[in-house]
Amino acid sequence: MGWFGRWTRPVRTATTLTAPLLRSATARAAVTRLSERLPGSHREPDSDGRSLVIAVARDDSGRLLVTTALTGPDPYEMTASLLAWGAVSVVAVRTGRVHRPNHPMHTSTLSN
């Protein structure tokens, strides 16, 4: 999906190369130990499928400034809400109008 920007291809290559290594019990145990040190590793998934977003801010030297965790709706609901918000924002910018939920938005408005 390109989440890593210019690092997408190197991450994919590294994943392809390391996949065979992770088939060993020793490597899996080491990865498990390392992952337990990540922010939010003590959290359990919500039974209702809610999203968990963890943000870590560091200064230029890499010193931890703050860590926060946010929960939200299930990932599909969150994606749909973000796409709807983006579409309404585009229409508002292009037309100068704000669309409310009771005001239908037509795709023809987006092409102007």
Image: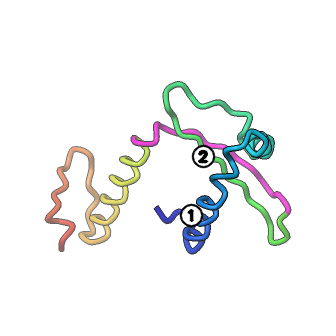
In the image, residue 77 lies at what x, y percent? Answer: 40, 41
Q: Residue at x 60, y 46 (%)?
A: 53
Give the Cα separation between the discs numbered 1 and 2.
23 Å
* Region rendered in magenta: 63-76
Colouring rule applied to residues: rainbow
In the image, residue 62 lies at what x, y percent? Answer: 83, 65
Q: Which residue is mark 1?
A: 12
32 sits to left or right of 81:
right
**Considering only vertical position in the picture, is 29 above or below 108?**
above
Q: Who is closer to the viewer here, 104 or 107?
A: 107
48 sits to left or right of 96:
right
Q: Residue at x 59, y 31 (%)?
A: 45
Q: Which residue is mark 2?
A: 53
Q: Who is closer to the viewer here, 99 or 59?
A: 59
Q: Residue at x 43, y 44 (%)?
A: 78
In the image, residue 100 lies at what x, y percent? Answer: 27, 50
| Mark closer to the chain start, 1 or 2 | 1
